[in-house]
Image (cartoon, rainbow, N blue to C red):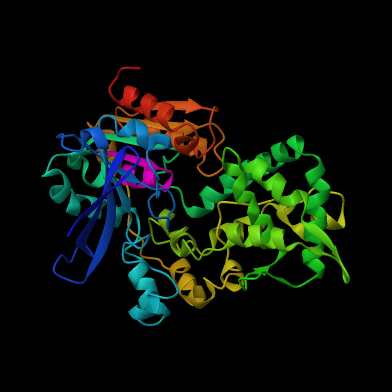
Amino acid sequence: MSVSYRQPGVVLTDRRFTVPLDHRDPSGETIELYAREAVASDKAHQDLPWLVYLQGGPGFGANRFIGRPAWLGRALKEFRVLLLDQRGTGASTPANRQTLPLRGGPAEQADYLTHFRADAIVRDCEAIRPQVTGGAPWTVLGQSFGGFCTVAYLSLAPEGLSTALITGGLPSLDAHADDIYRAAYPRIERKVAAHYARYPQDVDRARRIADHLLTHDVVLPSGYRLTVEAFQSLGILLGGSEGSHRLHFLLEDAFVRTPGGHELSDDFQEQAQGLLSYAGHPLYALVHEAIYGQDARPTDWSAERVRAEFPRFDAAKALAGDEPLMFTGESVHPWMFDCDPALRPLRETAGLLAARTDWTPLYDRARLAANEVPAAAAVYHDDMYVDTAHALTTARAIRGLRTWVTDEFEHDGVRAGGPRVLDRLLALARDEA
């Protein structure tokens, strides 16, 4: 039963759906999907076209907006919006350390999680679309990993789409995870260099924190073990529009003087654990590399293996000399499953997924080359999370896709510049720009 309620300027309705766990076996096990419908208060009784929003990730539920901020306000001018918690996230039969043991042991958990990639999310959308729109095609807005899902949508079920909009999420169609990370580490290095150029005082601050972590066993209040590698992974902030500034403020007062000497402050530790913990989005860690699996090659902890090819990211070597500490970001490593209490029980499950060799293709080049769905994509110049060269190669492979390449925004442009970004993409897709 649907429940509706109001926030300023918007009417919201909770929607729940039942879909097959494995869409190849529609009579088999089912899971529940949750989505929040949003419509402008003054249009609540109008017959409007639908827009379904696919969140970035993998592993994050849809935004819990209050009112009509960011891109949502622009979308509500002409659409009813469905904010979908993709399977396993938010309120959609969540998959985490508490629920996955219901499946059995690590092998059963890993088998279950093979059903949580872009192809299954597309099939979910198609399963619920008739119930939402009455069968009419809808517009999809895919942010980051949601854009990966959108390209899969154009490959698997283009008949379900009236328009496809992508922000910071054009995937490589055939790159192995190793190729993804070989392209990623130089981008991350450029972002770190830009951060230190903006805040040169952070070079010494980061080195001091890293040195402390190399010589002390620091356990955060949540039980998270803060190693130097974990500290380096805070560089994930550098892919966002405000990320460099947020990292700077985190570093500037990291230490306090105590009777036992200088220690990392409670405030620093509290902020760090909020940024590092996967408790709210464990699927990000579990299936992050699996979203690139498309053949018989295992991903095999790709980010960790490829990192060894870039020695500047070795903290101990940097501190032994006079090199600045390199932050990392947008990568998952096996040590995270030792450090994070939200991931520790899932360490073996993650290892089995990393070793898997039966991944199936997610994208159909022939269908993309014959695409007839109006489509537009925002490509952020030197995006830290999604390689620009890979994105533009894919853009050329999708017939009719129009791109807006910009350095005005970082990866979170749909949040930072929401109405303007959505306006531009709609105009491009409608051939009005």
What residue sits 43% from the left and 33% below the top?
A: 418
Q: Quadrant of residue 167?
A: top left
- 354 horizontally vs 360: left or right: right
Q: Quadrant of the N terminus?
A: bottom left
Residue 21 appearing in the image: no
- Residue at 39 percent across and 48 percent down: it is 55
Q: Residue at x 52, y 63 (%)?
A: 278
- Residue 37 x, y percent position in the rendering: 26, 47
Which of the two residues, 249 or 46, is positioned nearer the viewer here?
46
Name the image quarter holding the C terminus: top left
Q: Name the residue furthest bottom.
A: 105
Q: Quadrant of residue 304?
A: bottom right
In the image, which residues are magenta?
Answer: 139-152
Closest to the observer, 120 or 309: 120
In percent of width and height, residue 143 lies at: 41, 42
* Relative to 144, 265 lies left or right: right
- Residue at coordinates 35% horizontally, 72% vertically from top-left? 111
Verify whether residue 143 appears in magenta: yes
Residue 425 painted magenta: no
Q: Position of residue 227 (x, y in %)?
A: 70, 66
Quarter of the image holding residue 332? bottom right
Could one spot residue 15 in this view of the protein? yes
Which residue is nearer to you in this view: 297 or 321? 321
Q: Is residue 82 left or right of residue 393?
A: left
Q: Could you tell me residue 351's position as x and y percent?
A: 49, 72
> So how many labels did they put on this image?
0
- Front residue (pair 345, 53): 53
